[in-house]
Each structure stands twice: as structure tokens, then as C-alpha cells.
Amino acid sequence: MSAQPNPDLQAPVALVTGATSGIGRAIALKLASDGFYVIVHGRDASRGKETM
């Protein structure tokens, strides 16, 4: 799943595991707001879509 099929190749990239809830989700959202291209990973795909 991808929310942005053509990422900005100049932006820093972050892979956040456990990004569907709790601290991982908060970190993913913060990194995205700071301009990172964020790849989220978690056990629940529907919650992952909510994070994106």
C-alpha cells in the first residue's frame, strides 16, 4: 500500500515499525510532519491506512 506513489527523492526516508498505534504511530506522524517520506509497518493493515 502506498499513499504517495511518487515520493520526493530529496526528502529523508524513515521506516517506522509498529506504526499502527502508540509510540510508533506518534513517531511516524511527527516524522511526516517534519518532511520525512515515511514508510509505516505494523500488524494491522487497516490501522496502517489510518496512520497514512
Image (spheres, rainbow, N blue to C red):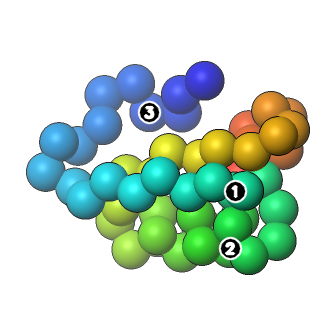
The residue mark sitting in front, 3 or 1, is 1
The residue labelled by disc 3 is: 4
Q: In x, y percent, where is residue 1?
A: 60, 24
Cα separation, mark 2 vs mark 1, equals 8 Å
* Label 2 neighbour load within 10 Å: few <14, some 14-19, many 20+: some
Mark 2 or mark 1, earlier in chain? 1
The residue labelled by disc 1 is: 19
Q: Which one is in front, 27 or 17? A: 17
The residue mark sitting in front, 2 or 3, is 2
**Residue type at numbered disc 2:** Ala
Query: Does 10 appear above or below 21?
Result: above
- Mark 2 lies on a secondary structure that is helix
* Label 3 neighbour load within 10 Å: few <14, some 14-19, many 20+: few
* Label 1 neighbour load within 10 Å: few <14, some 14-19, many 20+: many
Mark 2 or mark 3, earlier in chain? 3
Q: Are marks 3 and 1 in contact (CB under 8 Å)?
A: no
**Residue type at numbered disc 1:** Ala
- Mark 3 lies on a secondary structure that is loop
Q: Which one is in front, 2 or 23? A: 23
Residue at 60% of width from left, 73% of height from top? 27
Mark 3 or mark 1, earlier in chain? 3
Residue positioned most to the left: 10
52 relative position to 47: left or right: left
Q: In x, y percent, where is residue 35?
A: 34, 65
The residue labelled by disc 2 is: 26
